[in-house]
Amino acid sequence: MKRVVMSLAAIVLASAAQAQVTVKDAWVRATVPQQKATGAFMQLQSAQDAKLVSAQSPVAGVVEVHEMSMDGGVMKMRAIPSLDLPAGKAVELKPGGFHVMLMDLKAQVKDGDTVPVTLVVEGKDGKRQSLELKVPARTAAAPAMKHGEGHKHKH
């Protein structure tokens, strides 16, 4: 049994080394019934300069890399063609900033669900690598979030 565990660890490490991109603290925001969109958030770090060029998930009809920003007091969100992953620097995908947008949801994403997400990363050499993730869904107020994260609204 110990050998099997060690072999699996070696496979995971080998694929991580090949991808040169690590993913930490990934989560998808749980939805309410009839909600048609949500976001996926995580920290990405690449060993070499690369960029996140696309994402897919079987739970959504459309998946895009998005940027959220404030423009004259108005929150704006737009799809971006790619997100730079500078070598050795953590890039945070978080509420209110860069994120992966899952739209045209096929079903409600419930707290505790596991959502498959595939990220496509392109290296400086133009080669593309797919990262297959199993991302936990949770409510925005889940304790795993750091203090101060989430949407802030003024009324």
Image (cartoon, grey):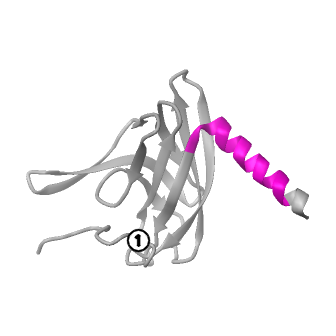
Q: How many numbered marks are there? A: 1
Left or right: 25, with 38 as reference point: right
Q: Residue at x 45, y 78 (%)?
A: 33
Which residues are drawn in magenta? 5-21
Residue at 51% across, 60% down: 26
Vertical order, 145 against 18 (above or below): below
Mark 1 crowd level (few <14, some 14–19, many ≥20, 10 Å Cα)? some
Looking at the rendered structure, the secondary structure element under dot 1 is: loop
| Amino acid on which disc 1 is placed | Met
- Viewport quadrant of the C terminus: bottom left
When the figure is inspected, residue 65 is found, relative to residue 127, above or below; the finding is: below
Quadrant including the N terminus = bottom right
- Answer whether residue 123 is magenta in the image: no
Name the residue nearer the viewer: 27 or 146.
146
Question: Which residue extends farthest left?
Answer: 72
In percent of width and height, residue 116 lies at: 61, 59
Q: Position of residue 64 (x, y in %)?
A: 43, 47
| Depth check, front residue: 124 or 78 | 124
Look at the image and say whether residue 18 sits in the magenta stretch: yes
The answer to whether 132 is drawn above or below residue 35 in the figure is above
> Nearest the camera: 34 or 155?
155
Q: Which residue is mark 1?
A: 145
